Amino acid sequence: MIASSRSQICRSTRNTEKSIVSSRKVNAFNVTNPSSASFRHSLRSGCVLAQHSSFSQKTAHGLHSSVRTWRGSSVVPLAAVQVETPVVSGDFSSTPTSSATLNGKVVVFVMGGPPSKRPIFERAKELGVKIIVVDNPDSWVAGLEKEKIVDKFVPIDLFDDVDVVVANCLDGVRRAAAALQISQLDGFTTYWEVAVPLTCRLAEKMGLPHNPVMSVDNSRDKYATRSVMEKAGLPTLKHFKIEFPEDVDKAADYIGFPAVIKPTSCVLSLGVTRVDNREELYTAYKKVTDDMRNMFGKNMSLSDSSMMSIEDADDGECSAGSWIKQVLMMEEYLDGPEVDVDLILSNGVPVFGAVTDNWPTFEPYFQETGSNCPSILPRNQQEELLDLGIKSCHALGLRMGVFHVEAKYTSRGARLLEVNPRMGGGEVRDTILTAWGVDMIEEHLKACVGIPPQPNVPKQPLKCVAGYTVNAKVSGVLQHNKYLEGWQDHPDVLYAVPLVKPGTQCVGFKDGLPTGVSLLLVAKPSVQEAIDFCKAIEESLDVPIV
């Protein structure tokens, strides 16, 4: 199984990183003269800024001007330069909370997501958390109870009316707690995007820590996020909601071209498409709406009748039972490099923030290619991006836990793409853990049970990390995954894992949204070395698609 293979690699990675973290020397200090007054205000006294500092505006401009968009060739589209001094700013006057404080806490996980989420449950188990999982009856997570990773699996039909689902979940959780002789629940959590709205509703009903329901709903709805940003006086994008076919031309008249069309609420960049003229817009609109109708099954209202359920197409391995709005939005296309801003908030106070550079996506579909951490953007740009990420969370009313903010640094400054009210997926957790020694799984669990997150962050990165998604270059059937075997045991390869099974019909870049067939994550002493190494691996791979 792909899931078990990835799990074994992730366990090995986690053990390696534990050794790195435990052996490091943490240099705690306070920044006394940040360059931006607004940034100082947003950070207050508690935020940790993980960044590179001595990197000039001129160098950055030259770097990103030379970036080539990936078109199926063997290219890692970012030629990083060596940066001398990475900087972390923050207040380390308090002692970080021990991992032992999670021992014995009872946490309800709402939905498991895909099998690649297995390491999250394994980590929670290592931390001593008692785990109850609520998910659809056919979820792969049910097997974790037999493996004694999960203490109790609660099968609930999540494809029903929202009030019925909430009532059934609460009843199922109470019965599970009684069966385990547990008198008190400590928190609800999820690491799966589409389950966040249900999770916060359940926590609200039980009076346990959670972000406000409206805040989560607004962050999940990209159009609502834009409206909140405007009302807060924060920089935002020109945008137009497309609810009906007759709205398409209105949107084009208002936005102009180039532009981006996307669902207001979806996952994994599904349906996000660049359009350069009306003909492309009409084609993209039809394709996205058709794809959403085909993908989303039974109707399941959360706040209105436009919310739909989604089931993962991977042989039933990823139950979802979630809510996706079948409403689209058109917005202006942004220039400049894209980044992830990963944040941890404790009662509204930012206690950690790190910027990860994303390599140019495969357009027009915005398919991910690669990333590097720490960021090599100039210090002032990183500060502006962090400032925007924090202020966006505050504007939405998000107060606690881990957040994955996506943004761009444009010719007009930092601009928000979206705020995800959960931990970043894919390699994000492993990237942050390897580079900065901060375990986003653990810190989010703390927030969900009411323990203030206080990550202990080094002054300099422990290692520099590069990740790369190997996309199918041609369409056809994947014959096997043995092409990764030569790299999986390399000491600098955190993992080289398949994303699809042999026999999968893959789409090449010339025929549509390319299929991501495998994921690489490597660690080296410098960003340049990490990127070069990642490129060398990718160029060596002969993916057997015929």
Image (tube, rainbow, N blue to C red):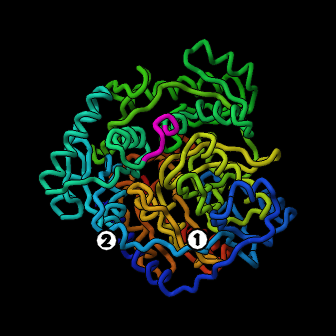
Is 5 left, or right, of 545 in this rendering?
left
Residue 113 vs 520, above or below: the answer is above
Disc 2 target residue: 126
Disc 2 residue type (three-letter): Glu
Q: Quadrant of the N terminus?
A: bottom left
Q: Residues within 10 Å of mark 2 (few under 14, many from 20)?
A: few
Work out whether residue 453 or residue 80 is closer to the camera in this orientation and state it: 453
Work out whether residue 89 or residue 435 is closer to the camera in this orientation and state it: 89
- State which tag comes first along the sequence, 1 or 2: 2
Residue 217's mark? none
- Horizontal and vertical percent for residue 77? 68, 60
Disc 1 target residue: 465
Q: Is residue 214 magenta?
A: yes
Q: Secondary structure at mark 2?
A: helix
* Residue depicted at 53% across the width and 53% down the height: 347
Q: Identify the image quadrant of residue 169.
A: top left
- Horizontal and vertical percent for residue 155? 19, 43
Is 326 left, or right, of 100 in this rendering?
right
Q: Secondary structure at mark 1?
A: strand
* Residue depicted at 63% across the width and 50% down the height: 361
Is 415 left, or right, of 71 in this rendering?
right
The residue stretch that appears in magenta = 210-216
- Horizontal and vertical percent for residue 464? 61, 74
Work out whether residue 473 or residue 327 is closer to the camera in this orientation and state it: 327
Residue 155 vs 473, above or below: the answer is above
